Structures are given as structure tokens and as C-alpha cells.
Image: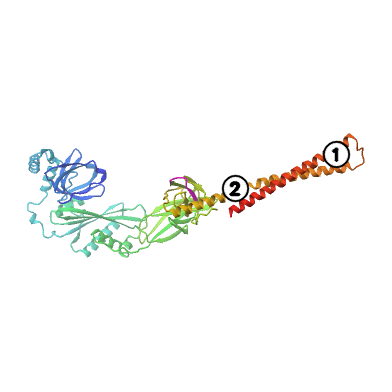
């Protein structure tokens, strides 16, 4: 063996120790899915000892037992969970076998469990391996599908169909049912029995209900013995529960699946799938991420996608109502889903690195008249699901255009890293924009400020006119016949004089304030344009 199997990162605590001992050749499969050939040296204190060559040096690896899915020797024996040790002379045989396989280095010797497993595996091999039956030497067996909550008739039909397709592709395939074999009650027994007779490949099937009530999951596990050690591959597919025969015969789905299980690549076909969506209440707009409205519910749409699809449904009447679901299409079949809409208030949370950036709506260029809707970090309401375009700007950094799909969910979070401007021309252009925007804002401020003096000036003019009006009334009274030297006459004459002066002062002040306001407004208007 020139290479040792790869160990996942989660087993970084494995200890490597140089040694010269060797064990039983086995096929190892970890829970992570990694499979590799190695030398099984036994199990000690819930730790599996495996051996192999790394850079032409034999090395022992110790890995926790709970990290393994299976360890199988070349006869198909389960070494991960070995049979109990015999109580009689078998112990002496185990001890003798262990002595023969042990290394001169006692610290690296294989544990007794390893030796027992090797003795047991050897006992399963025929006395003369050359006497294996020629009838089975090149045979390949399919054991049918094990049913998990699936109708027996449907399971038997699919098993027979798969067996026929296998035999049609390769005449060496035969169909054996473990329920009809008097010597075996499970697939492990069949594999062990016929492996000793020369069979080199087994296909074990399983059929079960899918997460979708209208679908069935089918699995074929292929165990192929090459160089006396097994190579295991697993193929999976999903078919319609109600139209399983149609999927199998008309669409060639089972045929292609069987070919793939044998390691033969099949050119994919563009088979349409259909998704039917109903909502409560009806009339909701249905959409997919990055794709706006598809249809109004209840509705059915076609797709060529085979992976998971995220669907969004929303309904806007007074408030926004929405729901989201994930569905996996079934090629050639229809998947049905039902959604219950709930009242929501979508918010967009935007964070930038660095913070303090301005957020603008739309994808148009930002001008000096543009006004940001928020500054980062911040969140704001946005009640129209669908595609949203935002532009992020911060002094010293390039503008970032953000296009994303806003789903009808309570909150959508965006994390944006801004790119610093290093080009001189870009930096100068941004500085010019900042200068123009400051001038524009100054003009807007002056125009806004001009309103106050105009209003106050108009008030002074009004009060001045009131004084003039009262002075005129007194003047008319003074023209009436009376004693010019009387105290009352003199008093009215002085009041008339004071009102006239007060009206003049208020009129001058009001006129000045209005004039100043007009000037400020004119300057602001000039700066704005």
C-alpha cells in the first residue's frame, strides 16, 4: 500500500507511532464518508488501531471507535464489532496467531482483539481457495430492495425491474432474494456466503418514503471486491410515489439510475419538473430569489432545476403578508406545497467595513442633489419584496452598488466591505463632488434661512401699517372743532406723532428684513444651481 487514507480534521488528536507490525487488510469507512484500505490492528479501550505506510514507513494510527461507520475485511467480516471470543481452545489459537503477527517492538504490538478478528476471518476462507465454484466466479448479485414503509407490491415491482435492467446491461448480474435463501436472513450473510464462492460484486437496494409525501427515495449500495478488498459506492434518486412505473419505464429514470449505480456516467436529460403552490389567503404573488413575480397563487410553474428552490409568497393589502418555503423538484413530476401567510414588516440591516457610509436608493449615479436614506450601521423598513438596488458611498472609498432580492421575511442583513480609493483621479473626482455638495447644501440652507427674515419683515410691515392707520384716525379727530390749547387735544396730538414715528420704524425694519431675505434666497438659489 503506497498511500495511507486521509483522516478528517475532526480526528486531529490521533497519535502516530512508528512500528513494524502488520495486521488484517480491511476496507475502512469513517462517519465523514471517507473510505480507504488499511491494515486493521485491533480495538483497545474503544480505540481502533490501523496501520499503513507513510513515506515507505509503516505507521500506526489510533482513532476513537465512534468515528467509524464500518471496518470490513476481505471476506466481508465486520471487524468494528467482532464476535465474542470463544471460551475453549479457540483462545489458544488466538494467542498463537497474535504471537505470530506481533512486532519485535512490544510497545507497538497489535492488541488481542485484532488477532482474534484475524483468526475468525481466516476461518471463513475455504480450505482451498482455488476450489471456488466456477459457476459464481464472475457473478454479480442484486439482492432487491428493502422496503421502509412502502407497499410490498411496489417494492417487488421495482426490484424485478431493476434486476431486469441490470441483467440486460450485464448478463453476469443475477437477482437473489435473502428472504428466499434458506441459509441467510440478511444481506450481510448473503455477501459472506457468495463471496467465498467467487462473487465479486453485490448491489443492495433500499426504498423508503421521501420527505415529500408524493415521492420515494431509492438507494443502491454497490460493494465491489477488487484485490480482495471492497470498494463501496452509493447511488440515490427520487421518483414519484404515484407515478413510479411511469418514472421507471417512460422517463428512463430507473434505467439511468441503475447505470449510475454500476459506475457508468449517464448524460443528464433536461426533464421538466412542476411545482404547484397554494396559499392562505389566495392571490399571493409567488417569486423566487433573484427572480421577481412568477405567478399568483394558486398556480403551477415548470422548472429544469434539480436542486433546492426557495419560494417566496407575499400579499400586500393594508399590511404586508408573506411566507417562505424550500422545495426540491422531482424531475418529470409535480410537487405540491401549501403556505400560510403571516403579517410581516421587512427590514434591511446594512453594516459596512468601515462604518459611517451613506445609503442611497436606486442604481443611478449619485449627484449633489441626492439625499441618503440612512447611514451605516443602520436598519430601515422596506415593504416591497423583490429586487432592491442600493448604492453605498463613503469618503475615501469606492461606491458599492448592491443588488439583492428582498424576501418577505422579518429581516435581511447585508455585510459590505468597502474598497479604498487609491487612484488619484478617482480621489480628486470624489473631492470635487464633496465640495459641490457642500456648496449645494449651503445654498439650500440660505434659501431656507431666507424665509425667516421675509416672514418677520412682513410682520413688521403689518404692524407699521397698523400704527399708520391709528395715527390717521387721531388726525381726523384733531381736525374736529375743539380747544387747541386743551389738555386732551395736546395728548391726542402727541400720540398721533408717536404712532407716525413707530409706523415709520416698523416699515423700515420690515422692508429691510424682506430685502435681506430676498438677497439670501437669491444667493442660495445661485449656489444651488
**Vertical placement of residue 529 versus 61, above or below:** below
Name the quadrant containing residue 268. Answer: bottom left
Depth check, front residue: 103 or 420: 420
Q: Secondary structure at mark 1?
A: helix
At 64% from the left edge and 48% from the top edge, which residue is drawn? 450
Q: How is the image coloured?
A: rainbow
Q: Secondary structure at mark 2?
A: helix
Percent x, y of residue 481: 92, 41
Span of residues in magenta: 353-359
Q: Which residue is mark 2?
A: 445
Verify whether residue 358 appears in magenta.
yes
Q: Which residue is mark 1?
A: 493
Where residue 525 is drawn, which disc sits there?
Answer: none
**Vertical placement of residue 17 versus 280, above or below:** above
Residue 182 visible to an observer of this rendering? no
* Viewer-nearest of discs 2 and 1: 1
Residue 422 visible to an observer of this rendering? yes
Depth check, front residue: 257 or 154: 257
Q: Residues within 10 Å of mark 1 (few under 14, many from 20)?
A: some
Name the quadrant containing residue 115. Answer: top left
Percent x, y of residue 287: 45, 56
At 7% from the left edge and 53% from the top edge, which residue is drawn? 128
Verify whether residue 73 appears in magenta.
no
- Residue extending furthest toward the top: 487
Percent x, y of residue 20: 11, 44
- Sequence-wise, the earlier of marks 2 and 1 is 2
Amino acid at each position: 500500500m503506497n498511500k495511507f487514507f486521509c483522516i478528517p480534521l475532526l480526528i486531529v488528536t490521533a497519535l502516530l507511532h512508528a512500528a513494524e507490525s502488520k495486521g488484517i487488510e480491511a476496507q475502512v469507512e469513517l462517519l465523514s464518508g471517507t473510505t480507504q484500505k488499511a491494515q486493521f490492528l485491533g480495538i483497545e479501550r474503544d480505540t481502533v488501531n490501523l496501520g499503513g505506510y507513510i513515506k515507505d514507513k509503516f505507521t500506526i494510527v489510533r482513532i476513537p471507535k465512534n468515528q467509524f461507520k464500518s471496518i470490513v475485511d476481505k471476506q466481508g467480516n465486520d471487524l468494528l464489532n467482532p464476535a465474542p471470543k470463544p471460551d475453549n481452545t479457540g483462545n489458544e489459537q488466538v494467542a498463537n496467531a497474535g504471537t505470530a503477527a506481533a512486532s519485535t517492538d512490544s510497545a507497538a504490538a497489535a492488541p488481542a482483539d485484532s488477532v482474534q478478528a484475524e483468526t475468525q476471518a481466516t476461518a471463513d476462507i475455504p480450505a482451498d481457495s482455488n476450489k471456488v465454484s466456477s459457476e459464481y466466479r464472475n457473478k454479480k448479485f442484486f439482492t432487491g430492495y428493502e422496503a421502509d414503509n412502502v407497499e410490498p407490491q411496489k417494492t417487488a415491482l421495482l426490484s424485478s425491474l431493476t434486476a431486469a435492467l441490470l441483467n440486460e446491461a450485464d448478463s453476469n448480474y443475477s437477482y437473489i432474494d435473502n428472504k428466499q435463501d434458506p441459509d441467510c436472513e440478511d444481506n450481510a450473510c448473503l455477501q459472506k456466503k457468495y463471496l467465498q464462492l467467487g462473487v465479486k460484486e453485490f448491489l443492495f437496494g433500499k426504498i423508503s418514503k421521501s420527505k415529500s409525501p408524493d415521492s420515494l427515495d431509492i438507494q443502491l449500495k454497490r460493494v465491489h471486491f477488487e484485490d480482495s478488498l471492497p470498494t463501496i459506492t452509493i447511488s440515490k434518486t427520487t421518483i414519484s410515489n404515484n407515478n413510479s412505473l411511469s418514472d421507471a419505464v417512460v422517463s428512463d429514470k430507473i434505467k439511468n439510475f441503475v447505470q449510475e449505480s454500476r459506475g457508468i456516467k449517464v448524460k443528464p436529460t433536461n426533464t421538466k419538473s412542476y411545482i404547484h403552490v397554494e396559499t392562505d389567503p389566495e392571490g399571493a404573488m409567488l417569486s423566487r430569489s433573484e427572480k421577481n413575480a412568477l405567478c399568483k397563487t394558486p398556480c403551477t410553474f415548470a422548472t429544469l432545476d434539480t436542486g433546492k428552490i426557495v419560494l417566496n409568497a407575499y400579499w400586500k393589502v393594508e399590511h404586508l403578508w408573506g411566507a417562505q418555503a424550500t422545495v426540491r423538484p422531482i424531475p418529470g413530476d409535480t410537487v405540491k406545497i401549501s403556505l400560510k401567510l403571516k403579517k410581516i414588516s421587512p427590514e434591511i440591516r446594512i453594516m459596512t467595513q468601515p462604518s459611517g457610509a451613506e445609503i442611497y436608493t436606486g442604481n443611478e449615479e449619485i449627484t449633489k442633489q441626492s439625499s441618503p436614506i440612512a447611514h451605516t450601521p443602520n436598519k430601515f423598513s422596506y415593504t416591497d419584496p423583490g429586487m432592491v438596488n442600493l448604492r453605498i458611498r463613503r469618503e475615501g472609498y469606492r461606491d458599492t452598488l448592491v443588488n439583492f432580492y428582498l424576501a418577505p421575511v422579518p429581516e435581511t442583513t447585508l455585510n459590505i466591505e468597502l474598497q479604498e480609493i487609491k487612484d488619484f483621479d478617482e480621489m480628486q473626482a470624489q473631492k470635487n463632488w464633496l465640495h459641490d455638495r457642500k456648496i449645494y447644501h449651503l445654498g439650500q440652507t440660505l434659501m431656507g434661512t431666507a424665509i425667516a427674515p421675509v416672514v418677520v419683515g412682513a410682520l413688521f410691515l403689518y404692524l407699521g401699517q397698523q400704527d399708520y392707520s391709528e395715527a390717521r384716525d387721531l388726525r381726523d379727530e384733531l381736525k374736529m372743532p375743539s380747544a387747541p390749547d386743551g389738555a386732551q387735544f395736546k395728548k391726542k396730538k402727541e400720540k398721533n406723532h408717536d404712532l407716525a414715528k413707530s409706523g415709520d420704524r416698523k416699515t423700515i425694519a420690515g422692508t429691510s428684513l424682506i430685502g435681506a431675505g430676498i438677497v439670501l434666497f437669491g444667493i442660495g438659489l445661485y449656489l444651488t444651481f
